[in-house]
Amino acid sequence: MAVKVITWKGAYWLDVVHKGQRKRKRVGTGKTGKKAAQLAAVKIAAQLAEGNTSVFTPAAEPEPAVTFAEVAQEWLQKYPALHSVRPNTLDNYRSFVDRHLIPYFGVNPITAITHATIEDFIEAKRRPGGSIRFQGKALSDASLRTGLRALRLVLRRAVRRGLLPANPMNEVEWRGQPHIENVDPFTPEELRAILHAAPPAFATLVRLWAQAGMRAGEVCGLQWQDVDVEAGTALVRRTWSRQRLGPTKTRR
């Protein structure tokens, strides 16, 4: 058995020989490297004397880093199974993850996602070209707000899996533009002109829509059992959106 400190190519190395096996390992340079090599030589010699030959065991291959895309796809699968989420909301989340988050963060290790990289993402999406749907346009704050909610949930899952110590979204500095109502209701003259031009059945629907103030999906989701002609009432129970019936936005 022999454990020696040797110098080669300007650095200190360990030269270990034991029962026909040999291994050399570079330790470092300068006084620090020499001292580290001497201490390691003493430690390895003691281990070999006790029968511990782990110095000759090849180092295990490090496990590949978990990427953002892997966690995001797992979240898209698990989240609707574990939570009651509206189909339209889930569609919005899935669309944003597939079209914006994965193309931007996807191949990066989940551990590389920090509040700084998220703020860079927000900045990129608010510049011209940030939108996928409208070429050359910035992504709207409404879409970005929905997408960042999905990003927060993806990163929260990474925290729960022990891949991140904390959710970096908690440190992100961002605030969207204030919502400004820009309502321009029809005048009575305009509404009468629309009703006069529409086919009778559709005119009835438009009149109900205009006078009740329902959302578009709510008036399209009405069924005959929701309407009481004698009492003059309509009960809003569902909404029609993306070619399917679903609960109202407020679930009331």
Image (spheres, helix red, strand yellow):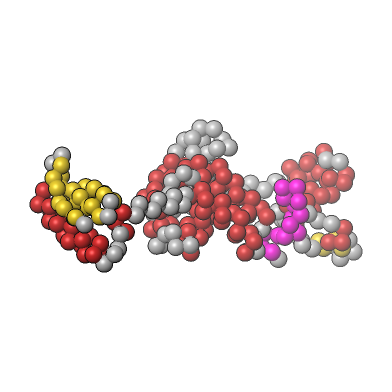
38 up-or-down from 140: above or below = below
Name the residue rendered at 44%, 50% in the picture. 64
Q: Position of residue 186 (x, y in %)?
A: 70, 46
Name the residue rendered at 12%, 52% in the picture. 34
**In the image, is 134 to the left or to the right of 49?**
right
Q: Is residue 169 magenta?
A: no
Front-most of 75 and 168? 75
Find the residue positioned furthest to the left: 31
Q: Position of residue 106 (x, y in %)?
A: 48, 45
Front-most of 243 and 180? 243
Q: Is residue 177 visible?
A: no
**In the image, is 160 to the left or to the right of 15?**
right
Q: Quadrant of the N terminus?
A: bottom left
188 up-or-down from 227: above or below = above
Start-end of magenta stretch: 238-251
Find the residue positioned furthest to the front: 19
**In the image, is 71 to the left or to the right of 210?**
left
Name the residue rendered at 78%, 41% in the picture. 194
Q: Is residue 244 magenta?
A: yes
Name the residue rendered at 46%, 52% in the picture. 66
123 up-or-down from 150: above or below = above
Find the residue positioned furthest to the top: 136
Front-most of 47 and 98? 47
Q: Position of residue 154 (x, y in %)?
A: 51, 56
Among the 4 quarters of the image, the one containing residue 50: bottom left
**In the image, is 15 to the left or to the right of 53?**
left
Q: Position of residue 236 (x, y in %)?
A: 76, 61
